[in-house]
Amino acid sequence: ADAPVDVMITLQPINIVQCAADLVWSRVLREFPDLRIALSEGGIGWIPYFLERIDRTYDVHRHWTGQDFGDAMPSDVFRRNIITCFISDPAGLKLIDEVGVDMVTWECDYPHSDSAWPTAPEALAADFGAAGLSDDHVRKVTHENAMRLFDYDPFAHIPRAEATVGALRARVVGRDLTTRSEGAPRKTPTPVTGADVQRRATA
């Protein structure tokens, strides 16, 4: 409780690895192969190591742990059933083919402070460029994967030509898009702690 809240924020996408391990090693994903689970705000940079680790664990220990994935590997089950989501993850984008691009989705996290809004398109484009992603990868990560995985067609509601960044921004000309913080500015340099956040949440 006395740790700076930055500890919790930093570990949020890393701690989700425990959930991923629980899911892969449970029988649920093998018994219900069509089930899809999204690890929202989980990031993707940790996934290549995780996939190597679960496959090695299976190779080395399955004879005494009793795990049986048939002809598949644990990483195959992860890539088939787990939808991964990131807000900003330059390292993960560089490894996206090892992650499995067809199950990766981007999220904005607006209005939280982790969001790059209102310049999210520019920030994302810079990350894509730095990772050297192809146009095909960009389309999948920005909208095609989400449309397929969540069975949603936004272009049924707004024509594709009117859904570009430029077209959407043109619709809000004159609106205040200033980034600002809720609440009063902090008067002391004392970091916010987990206990502070808990007190605010229960107040």
Image (tube, helix red, strand yellow):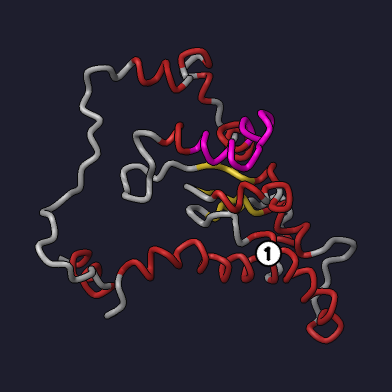
Residue 185 location, quadrant: bottom left
Most extreme residue toward the right is 71
Label 1: few (<14), some or many (≥20) within 10 Å?
few
Percent x, y of residue 93: 61, 47
Residue 70 is one of the magenta-drawn residues = no
Q: Quadrant of residue 50?
A: bottom right
Secondary element under disc 1, as helix, strand or loop, is helix
Provide the residue span drawn in magenta.
124-140
Magenta region, mostly helix, strand or loop? helix
Which quarter shows the N terminus?
Answer: bottom left
Drawn side of residue 49 relative to residue 113, left or right: right
| Residue at 42% in and 36% down | 120
Q: In x, y percent, where is residue 152? A: 55, 31
> Between residues 90 and 48, which one lies in front from this camera angle?
90
Vertical side of 41 occupied by 144: above or below: above
Q: Is residue 16 above or below residue 43?
A: below
* Residue drawn where x is 77% and y is 76% of the image: 57
- Residue named by callout 1: 28
In the rendered image, residue 155, in percent from the top left (x then y), is placed at: 53, 20
Displayed quadrant of residue 20: bottom right
Answer with left or right where residue 189 lies relative to residue 141.
left
**x, y percent for residue 159:** 50, 14
Identify the residue at horizontal 25%, vertical 72% (top origin).
Answer: 193
Q: Nearer the viewer, residue 178 or 78?
A: 178
Q: Is residue 199 left or right of residue 26?
A: left
Amino acid carrying label 1: it is: Val
